[in-house]
Structure formats: C-alpha cells, structure tokens
Amino acid sequence: MLRPWGSRFVLVSALLAAHAGAAAAQPPVARPVAPPAAPGAAAASKPAPAAPAKPAAAEAEAPPPASALGVPLFPSAQFLTSYDAGRNQRFYLYGCTQSFAELVAYYRTVLKDKGELIFDAPAMHQFDVGKFKETDVAFMPGVTIKDYTWGGSPGYLNPVPGASPASYPTVIQIVSPPGGIGGRPK
C-alpha cells in the first residue's frame, strides 16, 4: 500500500505559502466616492452618503480542546491554525519552542511508538495513529513533527505580528481521525 509520507506537511506548507502570497497580493479596498455636484445644485443636492463601515477583523480561530484531538498535545504547544484535509478530516498546526529532538522524544514516550523519520533535511518525524483505510480518510490520522530551523532558518514565523516568540523552531501537525476531532461526525 502506498502511504502518503510527508504529503501532509507538503500540502499544508503549500497552503500556507499560497495564503501568505494571496494576503500580500490583495489590492487595497476601493471606497465609493460621491460624484461631484453640478454647479449651482449644491443647495438641492442630498448630503454625500457616509463611507461604508470597515468590515470587522476576522476573529481568531479557536483551538480545539486538546482532549478532542485523539492524541496527546505537547503541554506548551501554541495553536496556530487548522485546514480542511478532506473527507471530514482537519490538519491542526501547533508551534513549539522546544527542539525537534525533544518533541520526537515526548511523542515516542506518550504514544509508545517509535514513529518514523520520513525526511532527514529538513527533519520530519511521523507517528501514525489508528488505521489507514483509503476509502475512509484522505490522510493517515496521526502526528507529524517538523524542524523549521533547517538551513539556518529562525523557524516558522508566528502568525501574530509582534507576538512572542517571533518564530517557532518546531511545528506539530495533528491530523484528525475520520469524522472530525475525537472521531465524531461534524
């Protein structure tokens, strides 16, 4: 059986790059302007309409409860975002200030599984949780840990401008079981 080694992070990395590029490439919002009044018609004209209200800032996505992920979550992991993985699954991304080796050791202990190093550079380690049945899931439920300090990078940039830390050396990706977090249908 062909397993989707690393395809989870490849897909999510592509989504993140596309999202960042799209956000940077968006033109400024055009505001309607009232047409100039004809000479002598100032007294008869209606007042100019008020500028439209700015849309409210998008609310930050709430992290799922750690108990509902189907796997233990590293205690100091910070929720970054989630993405639809298809077939009623989601990718959940968490940033960590701990090293890649520390996180791999943690998940080896709590999952009682040695997992598998799927890439040496940049280092990526995967722990499968549950069974993979292509008719039920798009991706193998589990945990993938990626080292973002490879090649001298400071890490995965914190999506919150000015927040601390500025970047995360390591990212944990959790793929939910079929039916959503905790195996429950949405």
Image (cartoon, helix red, strand yellow):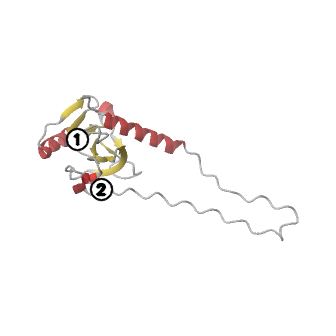
The residue at the point 62 percent across, 62 percent down is 52
Question: In front: mark 2 or mark 1?
Answer: 2
Quick check: 50 above or below 130? below
For the residues bearing labels 2 and 1, Cβ distance under 8 angstroms: no
The quadrant of the picture occupied by the N terminus is top left
- The quarter holding residue 155 reads top left
The residue at the point 17 percent across, 36 percent down is 115
Residue receiving disc 2: 64
* Amino acid type at mark 2: Pro
* Amino acid type at mark 1: Ser
Q: CA distance from mark 2 to mark 1?
A: 24 Å
> Percent x, y for residue 129?
20, 43
Instruction: Give whichever of 176, 126 is nearer the camera.
Output: 176
Residue receiving disc 1: 99
Q: Secondary structure at mark 1?
A: loop
Q: Secondary structure at mark 2?
A: loop
Question: In this image, 31 relative to 177: left or right?
Answer: right
The residue at the point 11 percent across, 43 percent down is 112
